[in-house]
Image: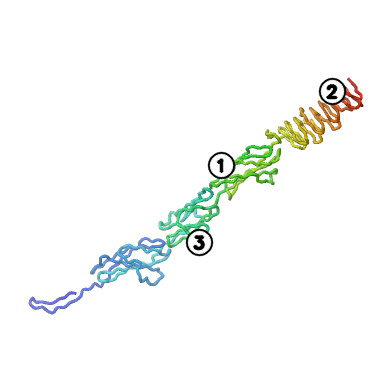
Amino acid sequence: MVYAAISDGTNVSKESSFEIEDGIAPTVTVSQGAIATNSIAISVSSKDDQWGMPEPITYKCYIKKSTETEYPTEASYTETDTSYTFDNLSQTTSYDIKVTVTDKAGNEGSKELKGITTGTVGEATGDLKEGNIIASEPTWSNGTASITSSKGSDVASNLSIEWQINGIDAGGWTTGESVTGLVHNDIVYARLTDGVNYGKEASITIKNTAPTNLSMTFSSKSTNSITVNASASDVNGDRLTYSLYTSTSLSSGYTLKTSTSATAGQRVTLTASNLSMYTTYYYYVTVSDGISSQTSSKPSIRTYCSGTTNTCNTLLCNEGYNKVCTTCNGSGNVDVTCTNCEGSGQTWQYCGVCGGSGWMQNSWGWSGCSACSASGKIYYSCGECDGNGTISDGCTICNGTGNLINYCSHGYTTSHRYCTHYTNTSVTSHYYCAHNHNGVQHDD
């Protein structure tokens, strides 16, 4: 209050008074700061050219959606700091902001910023190979996989990655960049979040890659088995199962003979047992990681003949005999260089063909038959000996129906050459005979 009076130095008039008032509101400045998907930052200042501002200055900050008509009655912020961030806002939404301040005189000044739009949480895209979220290739170990995700180069630092497996349940999201314990066909969903808002999710499907580089090599064989070696690669680090199949037909009839498991890259040995001797088998190996598999080619191999361990690797088959094989089958046919032939009680060595009826034939030009016993006959370098005791050229001994002949050229009803002795009816022996006719000896 100001009082005033007039004086002439001696006399003083009655005083009068008037009140000094500051009725001008302070000036408020509001500057827009960083805008995020869920926040808007501001900075404020104020001044008063009259009585001035109190110390400290208190600011009240209000915010509303631009679509709303009134600001809330309660300020979001009432403090002395000149910087403030409105948070927990909705993405892609327009907001209005108002700041008020009071000077010493109690005058309130205010300032508004209108139509400030928050940012948008970017969506994940595709199969998480590029864009806002990028997932690594699965890393496999002991049958399970893990992936690591990262944000794209243009993604704001305030955004985080959330994920979940095989679903997008509201409460199932986990914040983080690494996902572990994944198996084949798991689907990993990922999205960005600012803690309030969420971007659209995308997914990646985990696939277990099939084994590769299957290698199968023949190892050995016996009369009733085939043994092979096998190995394969697997980028997933799975434990692999190898299986050996065999068949006597290339196109069908394959049966599983044995299986074994090993780590990827490890060499395994597989044996197919209980096979038939001297039989051609087709075989192949499969390798599986439990999900996918690979199959080898289908080569063939012939098992050994009975009682031998020699190799039958050069087969020259022709009309019932085989060359360069160790033993023969049981149908009466004998193979060259055979030691034993177990069929019909017969044993042959260096024979050509021995018929099942006891006939021995040397028609292929091989000689040196040590013994061939069938139907009571014993042959040595024989051509033919029938069951009636008739012997053809070149027999040392032919024991059929009581006949014994040494180097005879024909049967007993015709001439014989170089016979040791011959017994039939009244004739007892012959030696170097030219011929014998009807039981009568004729010496030449």
Q: Position of residue 315 (x, y in %)?
A: 71, 35
Residue 299 shown left or right of residue 184 in the figure: right
For label 2, the crowd category at 10 Å Cα-Cα, with few meaning under 14, some 14 to 19 and many 20 or more, is: some
Q: In the rendered view, tell whether residue 383 sits above or below residue 166.
A: above
Label 1, secondary structure: give it: loop
Residue underneath mark 1: 266
From the image, which quarter does the N terminus lie in?
bottom left
Q: Earlier in the sequence, mark 3 or mark 2?
A: 3
Mark identifier at residue 420 = 2
Q: Position of residue 281 (x, y in %)?
A: 68, 41
For label 1, the crowd category at 10 Å Cα-Cα, with few meaning under 14, some 14 to 19 and many 20 or more, is: few
From the image, which quarter does the C terminus lie in?
top right
Residue 410 shown left or right of residue 38 in the figure: right
Q: Amino acid at mark 1?
A: Gln
**Image depth: mark 3 or mark 2 in front:** 2
Label 2, secondary structure: give it: loop
**In which quarter of the view is residue 263 placed?**
top right
Comparing 435 with 309, the one in front is 309
Residue 280 shown left or right of residue 91 in the figure: right
Residue underneath mark 3: 169
